[in-house]
Image: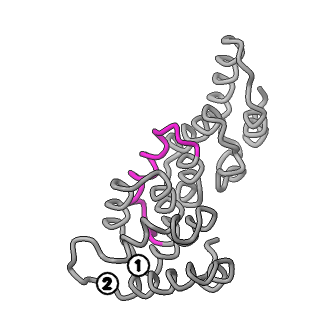
Amino acid sequence: MTPTSEEIASRLEPPARTWLDKALAEAGSAAEDNVAVPAWELRFAAAGRQCGSEHADAVRTLLLRRAGAGSGTLTRIYQGGTAAERRAVLLALPDLVPGPEALPLTEDALRTNDTRLVAAAVGPYAAAHLDPHAWRHAILKCLFTEVSLDAVDGLAARAAGDGELARMLGDFAAERTAAGRPVPADLYRALNLTGEES
């Protein structure tokens, strides 16, 4: 869950708190001001520098929520953003996009080998909207890139009784073994959740 503005502010130094207050005010009044790039979006990009990298995800997600960013804005920011900015967009999706229209962003992140993006892409939005085929491939992507399956929202519920996932996991384990590579421990965890025998 994204921390509140008060929770984030309590963790920041005074200059960063002042910066955050201004950024949130700009985001809150940004509705449709018909400017090429609203001021809050510039602040979105600067969040890591101004508030520290350890707070950047929370600050950026908060700015997106305060601005009420829709799928068009989220897509534009994601496509033009750094990996850190893309991660924040992915983390904000469950709060801002109730339907599947932002799935292309999740799918794009799952095509990367950036583990930060892959981990963010398998959160609550993916759990709610990825179709079974894409979700299974997301699990394999996590295993392939060594992203912990702890990042996968709804893993137990979606894996339960999924024979196709069990088959895919078995094939992946066989390929790794044949190549002399270790089988990730998380694979056995996921396989166990399917209820199928290996």
Labels 2 and 1 touching (C-beta < 8 A)? yes
On the image, numbered disc 2 is attached to which residue?
31
Q: Is residue 81 above or below residue 16?
A: above
Q: Residue furthest front?
A: 15
Q: If you read the primary sequence from the N terminus, does the residue marked by circle 2 or circle 1 appear first? A: 2
Q: Secondary structure at mark 1?
A: loop
User: Can you tell which mark lies on residue 184?
Assistant: none
Q: Position of residue 94 (x, y in %)?
A: 52, 67
Give left or right: position of 153 versus 25. Answer: right
Q: Quadrant of the N terminus?
A: bottom right
Kindly identify the amino acid type of the residue bearing the numbered disc 1.
Gly
> Magenta stretch?
96-115
The prevailing secondary structure element of the residues shown in magenta is helix
Residue shown at the point (56%, 71%) measured from the top left: 51
Residue shown at the point (64%, 24%) measured from the top left: 172
Q: Could you say which is closer to the camera, residue 51 or residue 66?
A: 51
User: Can you tell which mark lies on residue 68?
Assistant: 1
Q: Position of residue 186 (x, y in %)?
A: 75, 37
Q: Is residue 25 above or below residue 88?
A: below
Residue 87 on the magenta segment: no
Q: Secondary structure at mark 2?
A: loop
Q: CA distance from mark 2 to mark 1?
A: 8 Å
Give left or right: position of 133 versus 153. Answer: left
Q: Could you say which is closer to the camera, residue 92 or residue 169?
A: 92
Kindly identify the amino acid type of the residue bearing the numbered disc 2.
Ala
Residue shown at the point (38%, 51%) measured from the top left: 104
Q: Is residue 106 above or below residue 51?
A: above
Residue shown at the point (74%, 30%) measured from the top left: 184
Category of crowding for the residue at label 1, using alpha-carbon neighbours closer than 10 angstroms: few (below 14), some (14–19), many (at least 20)? some
